[in-house]
Image: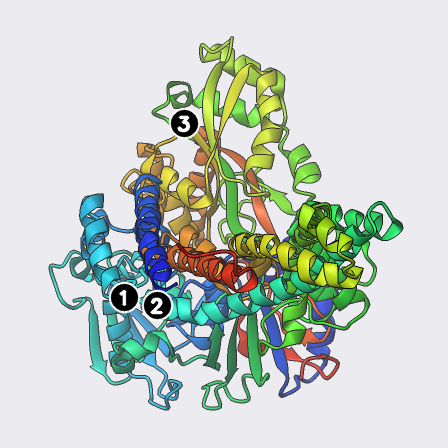
Amino acid sequence: MMFRMIAIVAGLGLALAAPAEAQTPRKGGTIRMTAPYGSSFTSLDIHTTQRAQDEIYAKAMHRSLYIWDSAEGKPVPELAKEVIVSGGGLVQTFKLRDDAYFHNGRKMTADDVIWSYNRIMDGTKAYPGARYVRIIEGAAAVEKGQAKEISGLKKIDDFTIEMKLTEKVDPGFYFFTALTSIYPADEAAKDSFIQHPIGLGPFKFVEHVPGSRIVLERWDRFYKPGKPYADKVIVSVMGEAAARDVAFRNKEIDTSVLGPAQYVAYQADPNLKGTIAEVAEVFTRYMGMNPAFKPFSDKRVRQAINYAIDTDLIINKLVKGKAYRATSWLPLTSSAYDKAMKPYPYDPAKAKQLLADAGYASGFEFEWTTSQNESWGLPIVSAVIPMLDKVGIKAKVKQVEAAVLSEVVRSGDYQAFIYSQQTGPDPLAALKCFHSSTPQSACNYMNYKNAEFDKIIDDAGQADDTAKRTQLLQKANALLYDEAPVWFFNYNKAVMAVQPWLHGVQLNATELTHQNVEDVWVDETSPAK
Amino acid sequence: MLSFLIRRLLQTIPTVLAVVLLVFVLFSVVPGSIVSSMSDDADPQVELRMKKQLGLDDPVYVRFGAYIAKLATGDFGTSFRTREPVTAMIAKRAWPTLQLIFTAMAFSVVLGVPLGFIAALRPGGLVDSAAMVVAVSGLSIAKFWLGLVLMYLFALKLGWLPSFGYGDGGLKYLLLPAVTLGVSPMALFARTTRAAVLEIMTADFVRTARSKGMSETRVVKWHVMRNALVIILTTVGLQFGGLMGQAVVVEKLFSWPGIGSLLVDSVLQRDIPAVQGSILVVVLAFLAINLLIDVLYGVIDPRIRYA
């Protein structure tokens, strides 16, 4: 069902998928992927970096307890053969694979999983994966330095682990990213690991040319029979869209993420149109409003902002159609997305009325903090300002660098900001960001507090029945829509050009560039040897 | 000569200290920290502990003192992000940057200086006008745009060269980024050489040489070229510094693994030791090249004394 939803909303480049299904995967060849997000790979220690850029290579080199299944649109067990749920959903027993080998030939055991999770909770390191491991009982105590080992993680035998959770959640949503990769315990403790990482994924490390590329080669003892298909994976750092465009047209790379302008150009070019793969990613773009800034404390003002902006016009003209209109917080590919929801219509008269009702008939002025991002930064803000001006609201731009913006957002040092936030894949986790117990520094960036909303989310967290849980989450999402703590702008449409000789590319709604590379293969028409 | 060298080396110490101090102060006042760039969900206690562990909770002057003490032993510190020694990180990136800068410089000198000479020998002529059009264009073109045009032409259209990447570090990977970087100094050398030659041509000693019956070839070779070289050399020295700065754009565009991209990435990731180390190396390289140029002055023109 989820696959259908992704396929429908994403408008898959079917030309890519259909022949891939019909052909037998070819063994050998080189997959040449690109890392398109600006800078070099941050580190070869994937536990230390939360950037999407780094996970591109990490997905090939490492593995976590779960993996994202793009076809199903959900996480599925990867390093576990079986997961037994007990204790009212709070105890998970993992029967681990006994055929997973690290790249130095050593078999993975329960000790490696426990060591890796304890490492991530090191309270002196700020490992970004801590946010996920924290759902294990006793993990927070390790982080705070009150315990040495996570009490809720117990080794039953070499290939069985019992995990006690603090909440009734699906652990798959927490343990599928590379941030929680399983490392070889003894080997990863050595200094040499950082120069020569060892994983248990389908490809092993060969070379890192900092700022330029990472080269990986097939791991012959990978646990999935017959996989990976390719002999080699090269991930090139290519932050400049125009340079990627030339390299893609010149057949030097196999994948290239497209921005709005290139999206239009590729659609218009008959030679390139068939190379486009697109998916509704689980990111929502929005303008956050600080309730401590007086006008924004009034719901009517926040709603007025939503009515005052011609969002469709901006998506069509500025974002060049490379986005889906946001109808509330949860994105299209969320399992709790409610198709019945409709976006705020463009209605400046209604906006004016709401402002007058709230006591701002003559408008007000606010400072809008933004980065330069082309899809959800300064260009968008510049287009919105005249629209707000039309209803009497004056916005002053405060432009900051992207890293500074994330600090501003976490600290609450703003009147309004524009941002892109992950809103999936777990709808409960995404909506929990608005729970009053969630600190602003975590993900409750608008410092939202609403007892009714809290109650619905708490009930959803306790619900055993999936349908009941989804219903409650939809109710919370609808309440958020009415409360409008943000201007609901868009859900990201990720677009990637894929060469015709590359097959098996998955429409990953969590991040299109993150591919399970063992399923990807190149046919003999690839110019790469 | 030796005392000159020692004096010049001693003069570099305050310059280096000033640069290090400036970088320190800048990174103390700009918002953002290594912790926030690592995790947007870090526990406040973890953040405090991490800052303490990295020495980031000490006052700037304490951190500065500690850094200088380390620096005195040749230790550039450890990267916050990669946990590698900064010297090792820079060492990996130094060779690609040197390859790029020296190739760009060679390209610009080999083309720019003769172009300026030829233009000056026939001022106002067709060659002069064409050379100056090339020079002005070369100075005006944005590197990013030029790089893309070269990629389009030589990689996509002609298929002669790869459009990006380091490959094995060979010439075919180096050519496009080096030419992109070298066009602007090439244009500058052409203009500087032309101006220098034109000025020297009208100097008294050239007139005297001619009046003594010296052939035009000998005049150009012994008087004009030698005197112009001093001016050109000064420009070359200054351009090295400029090229290091401009290499950032080119390295990024061509996925070239140099110090420029290391510097930019380290700034974005708030990796202060890596930023300090990269800037320091660039400054030291600039100072070293200028010292070398000063020494070369004396070799070219013995009248210059190191008093």
- Disc 3 residue type (three-letter): Gln
For the residues bearing labels 2 and 1, Cβ distance under 8 angstroms: yes
- Disc 2 residue type (three-letter): Thr
- Disc 1 residue type (three-letter): Gly
3D distance between C-alphas at marks 2 and 1:
9 Å
Give how far across and how far down residue B229 sits, in percent.
62, 58
Q: Label 1: chain?
A: B
For the residues bearing labels 1 and 3, Cβ distance under 8 angstroms: no
* Residue ID for mark 3: A415
Residue A1 can be seen in this image? no
Give neighbour class at mark 3: few <14, some 14-19, many 20+ (Cα, 10 Å): some
* Residue ID for mark 2: B87
Residue at image x 45%, y 66%? A75
- Seen from the viewer's position, the closer of residues B109 and A279 is B109
Indicate the secondary structure of the residue bearing disc 3: loop
Q: Are marks 2 and 1 on the same chain?
A: yes
Q: Label 3: chain?
A: A
